[in-house]
Image (cartoon, rainbow, N blue to C red):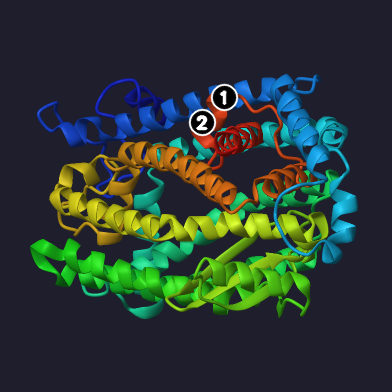
Amino acid sequence: REMMADVNRFFELPWSPMYTQSGSPLEATPEQPLAYWALAATVAFIVTVYALEGNLDARQKEAYLKTTFPKELEQTVSEIDAQRTKTGGGGGGGDDADNVNDSNKTSEPLLPQLQSKFKSAQAYGLDKINFGMISASYDTFESVLFLFLGFSPFIWDKAVQWGGSFFDWNETEHEVKISLIFLGIITVIGTITSLPFEMYSTFQIEKKHGFNKQTLGLFITDKIKSLILTTVIGSPFVALLLHIIKWGGDHFYIYVWVFMFLFSLFMMTIVPTVIMPMFNKYEPLSDGDLKRRIYELADKLKYPLKKLFVMDGSKRSSHSNAFMFGFGSNKRIVLFDTLLEQVEDEEILAILGHELGHWKLGHTITNFVVTQLYFFAAFYFFSLCFTNADLYRAFGFDAEDRPVPMIIALMLFFQTLWAPVDKILSFILTINSRRCEFDADRFSVDLDMAKKLQSGLCKIHLENLGAMCPDPWYSTYHYSHPPLVERLAAMMKEEKKRA
């Protein structure tokens, strides 16, 4: 009968989790909107997002089921091949004698290479989208189930119980320490529930399509290292954040913002120099023509390049990449060893020209500023509503004689009131990211590297089995980079303008 009563309770408002700190179901009226609507609205938002994103996934799945090479991509790449044939590979500069091998390889048409990989790319994309839909279904089910069960108040009470039993802590005087136990439990549970999905993605899908190079031992070692780093860095971060919120008074959001700014700088410093070398080996790029020309390109653009590394990305995957990092006059560039194998020197220079374009056009600093503004806005709005007890009552934190933990207040704010804002801002930033990619491509055109960037992008795309006919709605919502055909067409249009 108790179970039936719990089930019946979900068909009438206000919804209440099964586990509450008071042991009683929530009692609220429409005059208490947060308590009355919060749980139902949160579940409705989660399900709505799942339905909308599921619809986009279904559209993308339809795109992956196509068996005909996309006409638009065929026409665009055919035109690029024709131009490259006329110019003997064209664009990019450099000594011809130093690039004989590159020129011979570049003369190979791109279209047949893409067409030969189309079926494999479709199969890879289909496997990923099918797995993604299953994973998203589970994530949504878990999120909703945990809300209905009262997972958070239950785990918090367990953290209080264990803190008292093992360390003689109580939630009033030792809230921060109890919060760390709570987060530890959440992290362990999250790691366990996500592990089967991560292993299937790595050892089934990625291996099936020839990308995974990771052994089970390396996978487990990486997971252990990640958990240790989360504890070593995350625990002091959370402890300081909670202390600052409690110490900062009514304007704590200003102090939190300063703290987040400093922590961002700290992480930007230690991630590439300390953390990433714990997972991969970084070696200086060997002396030679490529190294010389990369430094020349950096000098030309006044990019203060100090070090140039090659990373053993092939240790885990055959996917390729390149990135830059560093502050002020101490900049560094990292090339994946897989990138060096997949494209030619001229194309690597063009790809780096594109990446340096992001720096030259101010995209890097703009993204950093936007991130800091996001932190400020989020914590400012949190400061306006974190004292409202009705929100916490709706999710089972309803014991009148117990304080609401600050970590719970933060989690529920970002999970409920801020979640729709975050979703909208994320979409806006995705659109802006694509705009920045077009701008950086245009910068490459200005450097007379368009043709080499076009061929380099095509080769990376086919080596990584990228989507060749993505659904327009899906790509608009998810892709931080424009689809290949749009980038190629935009560069060709820009070249014609300059001709």
Q: Position of residue 281 (x, y in %)?
A: 71, 76
Above or below: residue 245 compared with residue 498: below
Q: Position of residue 264 (x, y in %)?
A: 38, 68
Number of numbered discs present? 2
Give the residue displayed 77% in from the left and 78% down from the top: 286
Give the residue displayed 12% in from the left and 33% down from the top: 32
Q: Position of residue 345 (x, y in %)?
A: 77, 61
Mark linked to residue 472: 1
Identify the residue position indicated by label 2 in the image: 476
Above or below: residue 373 compared with residue 7: below
Quadrant of the image containing the C terminus:
top right
Amino acid bearing label 2 = Thr
Above or below: residue 393 compared with residue 237: above
Proximity of marks 2 and 1: CB atoms separated by less than 8 Å: yes
Asked which quadrant contains residue 183, the reply is: bottom left
Q: Is residue 55 left or right of residue 163?
A: right
Q: Is residue 377 visible?
A: yes
Front-most of 405 and 244?
Answer: 244
Front-most of 465 and 438?
Answer: 438
Give the residue displayed 90% in from the left and 52% down from the top: 104
Q: Secondary structure at mark 1?
A: helix
Give the residue displayed 30% in from the left and 52% down from the top: 374
Amino acid bearing label 1 = Pro
Q: Position of residue 52 (x, y in %)?
A: 48, 24
Front-most of 315 and 83?
Answer: 83
Callout 2 crowding tier (Cα within 10 Å): few <14, some 14–19, many ≥20:
some
Q: Is residue 165 visible?
A: no
